[in-house]
Image (tube, rainbow, N blue to C red):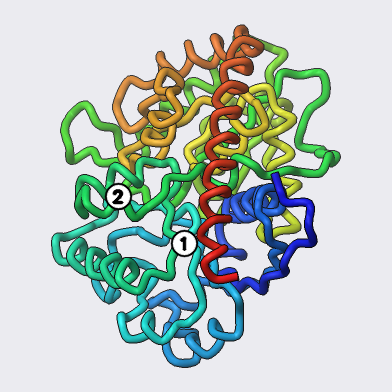
Amino acid sequence: MRETTKLKMLKVLHLASFIGNIGDNANHTGVRLKFKEYLNYEMIYNELEIRDFYISWKRRFFDQDFVNLVNQYDLLMIGGGNFFDLCIGESVTGTTLNISEDILKKIQTPIIFFGLGCDPYKGATEEIFDKFRKFLDTLIKLDKSFISVRNDGSIENIKKYIGNEYVKHIRHVPDGGFFTKVTDLYHPEIQKNTKVIAINVAGDMPDIRFKPELGDDYSTYEGFILGFSKTLNEILQEDKDISIVFVPHIYKDMKIISEVLENIKDEHRRKRATVAPYLHGSEAHDYIFDIYKKSNLVIGMRFHTNVCSIAFNVVTIPLATEHYKIRDLYGELGLKSRIVEISKKGFENSLNKLIKQSLSEESEIRERYSLVYSNLTEEMRTYCNELNNWLKRFF
């Protein structure tokens, strides 16, 4: 708990995504709530959009102007987000954070890297691994960074691909989305007096999520659409009390939602299927995630669809693909039995059975999720205690 004395105020420059995937907004909301609860400092945030620094966007750069801006603040906070994504050959670090050693040396402000994802699945090479090692070496040598990765398999990826010796310098922390809160809102998408299934299907990275080239057992993107639609048709036909609502997180989700709906029986999609609006930003966060909170079951491909639903103690079925983040998340939580492998052919029977089981055993599964959440809360409290001790070095 916080100290009872007056809290020292810290000006924080928060570098992250605020206008992209709406899951990021859940992440930021949650971590700020926990920092407010556990830290012995009052954080005053100024937001800096990381997409402006994307190499592909070329709007802003990690240069002297960036140094001058950062050095006006007490703290630089980077994340959460998948910014240790090991796939960018043009970057000096191999990641989104294209920050050179010279620039890092000029930054006088302490840096918190909060709950970043380290993902090698989008085209990592040994050259990229070497760049990332040098980046970590510089951060460790400068000794003014508090580095953490989120609970999505990132720490194991660092052990496997970067080196076990780096792990002692990196904390493990629950994603901030586990601690988000939402306002109670009205949703015309949610049909009254029904068992509500909220569904998120991800329309981006189909070549990474589905890899039929791996063998005959692996499904195509189109195969998933047909198999998933078939399962939904069966569930809706068998149980007249079920309604479904599709929830997009980014604009590409609208396309795959439409493709699934095209294969839903007309009587079902006209009467028992709705689609939430495509929204973005912090103000939209409450609306979208409150839909998950009000559902009986959430079926989802996206990371924060699953993270936040577990946080709300709503039963989930994660749809795992060859992008391993969802699989790794549930593995770390001890919930592997919830996973359905949709990138492989024949997933329909497993999904059908798990949907029925999830609705019939909703109370028991919620009890299990409650224990998981309790452990995550304790881990976050421990993390913040360590962060408090680190901050004492500077303030």
Residue 265: x, y in percent? 59, 25
Q: What residue type is labelled 1?
A: Phe
Q: What residue type is labelled 2?
A: Val
> Residue at 29% of width from left, 33% of height from top?
219
Residue 340: x, y in percent? 41, 24
The one of 247 and 52 positioned closer to us in this rendering = 52
Label 2 to label 1: alpha-carbon separation:
14 Å
> Residue at 34% of width from left, 69% of height from top?
139
Q: What residue is pinned by disc 2?
A: 167
Residue 81: x, y in percent? 48, 57
> Residue at 42% of width from left, 83% of height from top?
62
Q: In this view, does 137 lie above or below 308?
A: below
For mark 1, does the 10 Å Cα neighbourhood hold few (<14), some (14 to 19), or many (20 or more) residues?
Answer: many
In-image side of 310 versus 62 (left or right): right
The image quadrant of residue 63 is: bottom left
Q: Is residue 138 above or below residue 267?
A: below
Q: What residue is pinned by disc 1?
A: 113
Residue 146: which disc?
A: none
Q: Which quadrant of the rendered structure holds the N terminus?
A: top right
Q: Is residue 359 above or below residue 288?
A: above
Q: Count all numbered tags in the image, as a single digit.
A: 2
> Residue at 29% of width from left, 74% of height from top?
91
For mark 2, does the 10 Å Cα neighbourhood hold few (<14), some (14 to 19), or many (20 or more) residues?
Answer: some
Residue 88 visible? The answer is no
In-image side of 289 versus 163 (left or right): right
Residue 39 visible? The answer is yes
